[in-house]
């Protein structure tokens, strides 16, 4: 299984590079990498053109630039899938430090007969903590050609398995896998969570 980390955003609301923010002595992107390493044969970091994101050196980590610059996370998914050596990939944002490994593993286990496996909570989907197949590539290219960049438009074109709230709760009852950092208040909360030893002990 490949994992794709989307790191091409502008971090405009935070005002500085999100992946490099320190949480509990590690950069934000390193938190994400550390959660994904146990699941992945390779990790692809999809970035904006000309951007380099320092992280731990590993043969399984590589960086790719968005094929269509400035087009948002849908193109990040596309660029990562193009570069992937696996038929499907876990896709997460670079600003989600508290991913549940058990939940991600569950989504990969049920993904083999679907084009996408996507969490859904009260009819709201979480497309940046999901599993996508290379079978999505042609449909994403079609959407980009139409300048239709909303990820949820893809789900009407492919076979999707939605992971509902009761399934999510079995692994991540606080839904922290979907907690992403957009502003200083989110970053402060992440730092508080990172110091919670009880959280560190029970996360899996």
Image (cartoon, grey):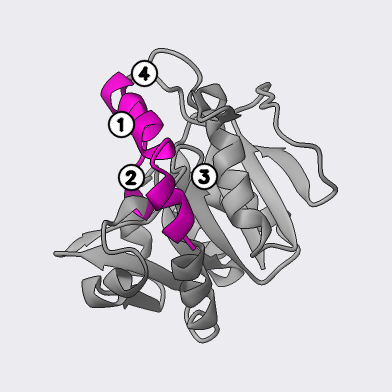
User: According to the image, label 3 marks what residue?
Assistant: 75
Number of marks in the rendered image: 4
Q: Give the Cα distance between marks 3 and 1.
A: 29 Å
User: Closer to the camera: disc 2 or disc 1?
Assistant: 1
Evaluate if marks 3 and 1 touch, with contact meaning CB atoms under 8 Å apart: no
**Quick one: label 2 or label 4, which is nearer the N terminus?**
4
User: According to the image, label 4 marks what residue?
Assistant: 14
Q: Is residue 180 magenta?
A: yes
Evaluate if marks 1 and 4 touch, with contact meaning CB atoms under 8 Å apart: no
Say the numbered circle drawn on residue 189. Answer: 1
Q: Which residue is situated farthest in the front direction here? A: 197
Q: Is residue 97 magenta?
A: no
Q: Which residues are magenta?
A: 177-204
How far from the left and from the top, in percent, is residue 7? 54, 35
Give residue 63's quadrant in the image: top right
Local secondary structure at mark 4: loop
User: According to the image, label 2 marks what residue?
Assistant: 179
User: Closer to the camera: disc 3 or disc 4?
Assistant: 4
Q: Counting other residues with Cα less than 10 Å from the Cα at mark 3, is it few (<14), some (14-19), or many (20 or more)? A: many
Name which residue lies at 62% across and 48% down.
Answer: 34
Q: Relative to 81, say whether 155 is above or below.
A: below
């Amino acid at each position: 299984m490949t994992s794709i980390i989307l790191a091409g955003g502008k971090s405009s609301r935070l005002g500085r590079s999100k992946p490099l923010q320190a949480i509990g002595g590690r950069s934000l992107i390193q938190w994400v990498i550390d959660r994904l390493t146990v699941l992945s044969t390779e990790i692809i970091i999809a970035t904006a053109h000309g951007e380099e994101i320092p992280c731990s050196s590993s043969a399984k980590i590589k960086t790719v630039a968005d094929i269509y610059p400035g087009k948002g996370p849908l193109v990040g998914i596309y660029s990562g899938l193009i570069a992937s050596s696996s038929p499907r990939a876990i896709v997460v944002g670079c600003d989600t430090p508290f991913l549940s490994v058990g939940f991600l593993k569950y989504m990969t286990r049920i993904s083999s007969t679907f084009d996408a496996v996507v969490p859904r909570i009260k009819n709201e989907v979480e497309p940046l903590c999901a599993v996508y197949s290379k079978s999505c590539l042609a449909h994403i290219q079609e959407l980009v050609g139409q300048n239709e960049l909303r990820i949820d438009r893809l789900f009407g074109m492919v076979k999707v398995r939605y992971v509902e709230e009761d399934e999510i709760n079995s692994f991540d009852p606080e839904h922290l896998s979907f907690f992403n950092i957009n502003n200083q208040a989110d970053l402060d909360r992440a730092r508080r969570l990172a110091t919670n030893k009880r959280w560190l002990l029970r996360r899996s």
